[in-house]
Image: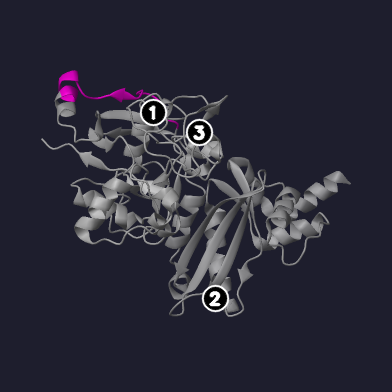
Amino acid sequence: MKRAKDLLMMGVLGLSFLAASIEAKETAAMAPFELEKDVPEQAAEILEESWCSVLEAWPEIAVMEPSITQRVLSLKRVTLPDPCNDLICLTRMGHALDVQWVLVTHLEKGKRRRLMMTVKLLNVENAEWATSRELDLDVSSIQDGNTEPFTDLAKELFPPQQSQATGNKPQILEDKESILRRQAATPQGMVYIPASTFLMGSEKGERDERDPHLVQLPGYYIGIHEVTNEEYKAFVEGTNRRPPAAWKDERLALPGQPVVGISWEDAHAYAQWRGFRLPSEAEWERAARGTDGRTYPWGEAPPLEGSEFRCNLWGGEDGFEMTSPVGSFPSGASPEGCMDMAGNVWEWVNSLYRPYPFDPTDGRENRHEKGDRCVRGGCWVHSMVVLFRCSARNSLSPKTEGIKHPYLGFRCAASVKE
């Protein structure tokens, strides 16, 4: 009887999925598409067919299409609520299908005969949302065979596997004389990071941190501390820039606290006003972890060990209800002497949020390109230590997100001028 069921299952899934599930590293099931009432069914079918065709050919994942998902659940006699769109139900679906991920796709009408597609990825084992992405789609373009939006989305959700960084080890690429000369020219409040290679990313981290790879950087300067309210106030007064809304809360407005509640564009404008710039994502991570690939800026010990706090995290036990004045946790300094690179506030960096490997020439450092920008470091509203790792990544909209969040700041960087 079991053999008969196995053969029946092969017929339902098809040889393509079975072969892909053997070759691919991961498996996923697509939940039935969720449509708003005003979404034309024909347009939805075009998008579903195109999206499924891209995923079917994607080498990193074996995906059950919505129709197959429903047939397998029926075969296994698994009854789920209709609609099945909450975390508990979708997690149950994933376990029943024995897959690692569940893809949820929602369609709603956009502007000018376009459709907005939201794709969420559920981690079945952890029963939590791993990521969410939005696409503004031109249905006629998709119908004409343009699959580029879906290919880019697949790259973000299931990044092509890069080979583990091997061969050359992380190293300093600058002689002592050059380092001393550039250190002597370091702008006030900054530290010099010598030209070097370092290991970026983590095999043990989230999907967007994989795979670790060697990145080579020229020498640069980066702020020892996050930009403070006092420093940002001079910018506001000197340029008539809108003051951060967070200053209305006296708990966030002390001169030595990091400025928070600003957009990526505000951060960029401040850095430019100072004659600096925002660090790239790679520069930020290199300054946080050095060249030895450590997990946290201070090493491998957890952020809280006994009664010692190495960074500002959730709760008042560390002595701070919200943000802490910059430099309040000297034991949490990075190998390069940078403070608060874990906890306190998320920090804007210049880079667009794109899949690894990191490539500064692929457009991700273009400040005029549209898309979410990376934020790094974790913040005071978190207690999950995974977010305080040097390699942890997050992203937000550059225009509006910063204004709404009293836990988002930045530090500056500068290029070497000789």
Q: CA distance from mark 2 to mark 3?
A: 39 Å
Q: CA distance from mark 1 to mark 2?
A: 53 Å
Q: Nearer the viewer, mark 3 or mark 1?
A: 1
Identify the secondary structure beneath mark 2: helix
The residue identified by callout 2 is 43
Q: Position of residue 49 (x, y in %)?
A: 56, 66
Q: CA distance from mark 3 to mark 1?
A: 24 Å
Q: Position of residue 10 (x, y in %)?
A: 74, 51
Question: Which residues are drawn in magenta?
Answer: 164-180
Q: Amino acid at mark 1?
A: Ala
Q: Position of residue 54 (x, y in %)?
A: 52, 58
Q: Residues within 10 Å of mark 2 (few under 14, many from 20)?
A: some
Q: Residue farthest to the top? A: 176
**Dots 1 and 2: beta carbons under 8 Å?**
no
Q: Position of residue 22 (x, y in %)?
A: 63, 41
Would residue 127 appear left or right of 51 to someone viewing this image?
right
Q: Residue at x 19, y 56 (%)?
A: 238
Reply yes or no: does residue 380 show up in magenta.
no
Q: Amino acid at mark 2?
A: Ala
Q: Earlier in the sequence, mark 3 or mark 1?
A: 3
Q: Amino acid at mark 3?
A: Glu
Q: Residues within 10 Å of mark 1 (few under 14, many from 20)?
A: many
In the image, residue 86 above or below residue 382: below
Q: Please identify the quadrant where the C terminus is shown.
A: top left
Q: Earlier in the sequence, mark 1 or mark 2?
A: 2
In the image, residue 342 above or below residue 5: above
Q: Earlier in the sequence, mark 2 or mark 3?
A: 2
Would residue 380 appear left or right of 52 to someone viewing this image?
left
The residue identified by callout 1 is 333
Identify the secondary structure beneath mark 3: loop
Identify the secondary structure beneath mark 1: loop
Q: Nearer the viewer, residue 215 or 72?
A: 215
